Amino acid sequence: MRIRVDPDKCEGHARCIALAADLFDVDDYGLSSVKVDVVPSHLEHAARLAVANCPEYAIEIVEE
Ligand code: SF4
């Protein structure tokens, strides 16, 4: 599984980071980006939680 954050949708609520700090980084403006290439299997549940809890629908799962 891969995930990505749409920078045009992200508003910097940081919920994704609170739910999955191992998957996301925050920049100086509070916006999120994905810090892993492939989501490790043990973090896939956390990735799906982040997707479900992003209020801007900015996180997308990219299945392979
Ligand atoms: S929860 Fe969504 S809007 Fe908030 S920082 Fe994460 S990706 Fe951006």
Image (cartoon, helix red, strand yellow):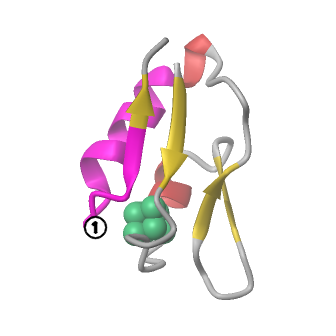
Residue at the image position 48 percent from the left and 22 percent from the top: 44
Q: Is residue 46 above or below residue 20?
A: above
- Residue 30: name its quadrant: bottom right
Instruction: Say which quarter of the image contains residue 41.
Output: top right
Q: Is residue 15 visible?
A: no
Position of residue 64 measured from the top left corner of the image (x, y, whole percent)? 49, 11
Along the line of sight, the residue nearer the viewer: 43 or 31: 31
| Residue with the mark numbered 1 | 56
The amino acid beneath tag 1 is Glu
**Region rendered in magenta:** 44-60
Question: Is the CB–ligand 1 distance for label 1 below 8 Å?
Answer: yes
The correct choice, above or below, for 61 with respect to 25 in the image is above
Q: Residue at x 73, y 46 (%)?
A: 35
Residue 55 can be seen, yes or no: yes
For the residue labelled by badge 1, is the local secondary structure a helix, a strand or a loop?
A: loop
Expressed as whole percent of the image width and height from the top left, the position of residue 29 reads 65, 88
Image side of residue 39 versus residue 63, left or right:
right
Q: How many marks?
A: 1
Query: Taking the image as four quarters, which one is ligand 1 found in?
Result: bottom left
Q: Can you say whether 14 is above or below 21 in the image?
A: below
